[in-house]
Every structure is written in structure tokens, then in C-alpha cells.
Image: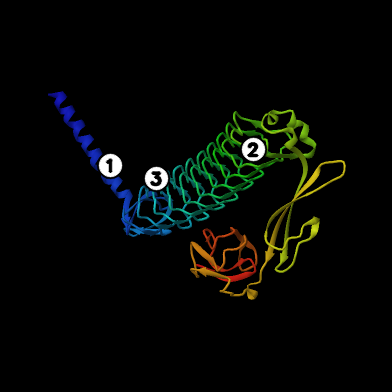
Amino acid sequence: MRNTKETMKRTVIFLFAVVFGGMLAAQTRFTVGDLTYEVLSEEDNSVEVRNCIYYAISVNIPPTVTNDGTTYSVKAIGDSAFYNHFSLDTVTIPEGVTNIGYKAFSGCSALTSVTIPESVTAIEGFAFYYCSSLTCITIPDGVITVGYKAFGNCSSLTSVTVGDNVRTIGDNAFEGCVGLTSVTIPDGVTAIGEFAFSDCRSLASVTIGKGVMAVERFAFFYCSGLTSVVLPEGVTDIGERAFSGCFGLTSVVSFAHVPPELGNDCFTGVNTKDCSLIVPCDDQTAYQTSDWSEWFETDNMTGSYYAEISATISDGETYTEYGFSESQSGTYTRTVANTGECDSTIVLHLSVNVSLSAVGTNESDIMLYPNPAKDFVRLERGEATDRMQVVLFDINGRMVREYVFPQGQRNLEINLCGLPAGLYSVKAGNTSRKLIVE
């Protein structure tokens, strides 16, 4: 009899705990409009977004939300909050959000545009995985970590801007972004993770910041369109197969005075007989007697003094110093022969200031639409003749985008992702047009 009473007592306590616990959990979540929130802290009245109605197309997450008379600040996008919301097209994340959770937008295959505020410090693993319609992304300066496969298999992604304060690009972060054409890794990044940019087949150029010390294994595996790589002075290790399958690679520049350690099969598939290796002038012997000599022909190893120059000229002027003769914005390289020592390689980053008051509207040369534009603008020229440089300038005359009209091509799409709203100038060849970005 005693055992029966004890059993009944425990059962009542258990049922009370389940019911009370369920009521308490229910009170921590609430729904306003299309979004469900969960309270993170009652002390500072903060919440995270936990879910969204499945058929939402465009979502503008508010910075604050009110429930039962209490106003909460939205501080995070929770794990899997928008997971596999196939109809979601655009989303705006408000200032104040600090974390984008694990699988937050994973599988949102229709998502074309997302605004990430400066307040975000972490983009967790799989956050935008398989967002196959996302065309560009700006990772703001506040972000410190880009997680595992955060943007993996975003197959339409062509442009990535990485914030200056990012320290780690996680493993597989951009793996399978087959449309990505260029990426600049800022000086604050210290390590490029394993498989970080593997299978980015359209990636033609990569600028690796001065803070990078290690390029991990398979980091640029099968980037078959990659033609040149510049390794900063601080790199000490290049992992296994880091550049394996980069069949188009023709130039490797290493600023490291001590040859970086090379992992197994580091350059497998690269035609290293025709690929040049440029190293610091005083360190040629060190490279020729290291593992690098197993990959690069001695005759293709050259020493060079290296200098980078940034210059700005006015529209119509020509930059003529150091043997250059350039009148259009762009990056130019020139080798200056020195007597009795290594040649000097000079890289010129040239900007051309364009006054918007002088911008013409010669519609017979080029059409620009839509205008105003938001995510992209298309250019169409009457005759697809020679290769043509296309440059986008802001209202202060600073170059913000640069493209090329290939020979024989009449149409070109310019990605406007990450540009603030305002007035811009598009210069294509000798023709300039005004553009309004919304």
C-alpha cells in the first residue's frame, strides 16, 4: 500500500512538472505577424526569431517587437528559423541582430537578396547553405567568424565582399559556389579553412590578405578558372591539395621570405612547367632548394622587387609615371629591368575620377535598364565589337565596380549588391550614363 501511494505521488509530481514546464515554455514564445519569437532574456527584453510562416515571400524583420505590453529587441536569427522556406525571396535583417544561427536560411532556394547589418558578429554554420538564387553577399565589418558551409553551394553567387574584421573563414564556407568570379580576403583574416573555396570553378582571381598565415588543405581545390595567386609574406603553411585541380593557374607570387611548407599534392593538376613563380629577390635560392622545386621548374622561378602603387587621375588624363601610360581605372602590372640585380615588379591601382555633372546620355551607344535599379542593372550596346571596359563610380567619383564587355558580347549584367542607395555613373568605353541605385 505504501509503495502504491509513493508511486501515485511521484506520478502527480511528474505530471505537474510536465504541464507547468509546457506552460512556461509556451510563455517564452509568441507570434507577431508572420514571425515567431523566443525570449532570450527577460532582464534586457531580448528575443530571437524562431520561425516564419512557410509561404512568406518577402520578410522585413523589425528591430523591436511588442507582446503583452512588453517591447523586446530582436538580437538573433535562431537556428533553422527559415530552414527550407522555398518561397522566400528577400529578407532584411535589422541593426541590433548579432547572430545568424545554424541553418538559419539553409535551403531557401528562391532567396535572391539579404541585408546583413553591421551589428552581426557571427554567421553560423550552414546559415545560407544551398541558397542557390543568392547572387551577392556583403559580410559587414562587424562579423568575426564565417562558419562551416555558411554559404556552401550558393551556385548563383558571383560577388562576395568580406568585412575587414573577419578573422576566420570556416571550413567549406564557400564550397561549390560555382558562379563566384573573384574574392578579396582582407588583412584581418588569419586562416582560410579547409575546402573554403573548393569547386569555385569560375573563380579567376583571389587576393589573400596580409594577415593570412595558413591556407588549409583543399582550400582552393578544383578552382579550375583560377589564373593567378598572390601569397602574402606571413604565409607559413599551404595544406594538402590546397591548389590541386587549378588547371588554369599561370602565375604564383609568394612574398614569404621563408618558403612556406607544402602539403601533399599541393599543386597537382597545375601545369607548373608553364606556371611562373615569382619570389622575393634575395630568397630565390631558398625556394630552389626547397619542396617548391618539386613543383616549379627552376627556369620559371624568378626573383623580383615588388611594389604596389595607388593613384588617382581625372577623367581624360593619362598616368605616365614609372613607364605606365594608362587612362582608365584598373590594375596594371609592369616589370622594370634592373642592371645586375632582380627586376622590379610594379602593380598600379589606378582610379579615374568622373564628374557626374559631365556625364552624357548617348543612348545610341549604350542602353541602361532598369533605372532606377536595386539588385542589378543591364547594359546593352548597339554593336558587339571590341572588348570594352565598364566602370561604376559613386557620386564622389570613386570606382566601386569594374567589369569587362567581352568581344562580340552585346549584353552585360552589373551586380549592385551591397551598394548604398544613391546616384552613380556607369562608364562604358567613351560613353557615360547616370544610374540611380535604390
Query: In the picture, residue 320 is in which quadrant?
Result: bottom right
User: Which residue type carries mark 1?
Assistant: Gly
Q: Which secondary structure, mark 3?
A: loop
Numbered disc total: 3
Near mark 3 (Cα within 10 A), the count class, few <14, some 14-19 or many ≥20, is many
Q: Measure how far apart labels 2 and 1 are at the Cα level.
A: 50 Å
State the residue lying farthest toward the left.
Answer: 1
Q: Is residue 253 left or right of residue 134?
A: right
Instruction: Residue at 44%, 56% (x, y): give it.
Output: 112
Q: In this view, does 363 lie to the left or right of 47?
A: right
Q: Name the residue under label 1.
A: 21
Q: Mark 2 points at which residue?
A: 213
Q: Nearer the viewer, residue 368 or 260?
A: 368
Instruction: Residue at 87%, 41% (x, y): give it.
Output: 340
Near mark 1 (Cα within 10 A), the count class, few <14, some 14-19 or many ≥20, is few
78 shown above or below 318:
above
333 shown above or below 212:
below
Near mark 2 (Cα within 10 A), the count class, few <14, some 14-19 or many ≥20, is many
User: Which residue type carries mark 2?
Assistant: Met
Nearer to us: label 1 or label 3: 3
Q: Mark 3 points at which residue?
A: 79
Q: Where is residue 4 in the image (x, y as percent from the top left)?
A: 14, 26
Q: Which of 52 and 222 is in front in this view?
A: 222
Q: Which secondary structure, mark 1?
A: helix
Q: Measure how far apart labels 3 and 2 are at the Cα level.
A: 32 Å
Q: Measure how far apart labels 1 and 3 are at the Cα level.
A: 22 Å
Marks 2 and 1, the one that precedes in the sequence? 1
Q: Which of 370 and 357 is in front in this view?
A: 370
Q: Position of residue 41 (x, y in %)?
A: 40, 48
284 shown above or below 134:
above
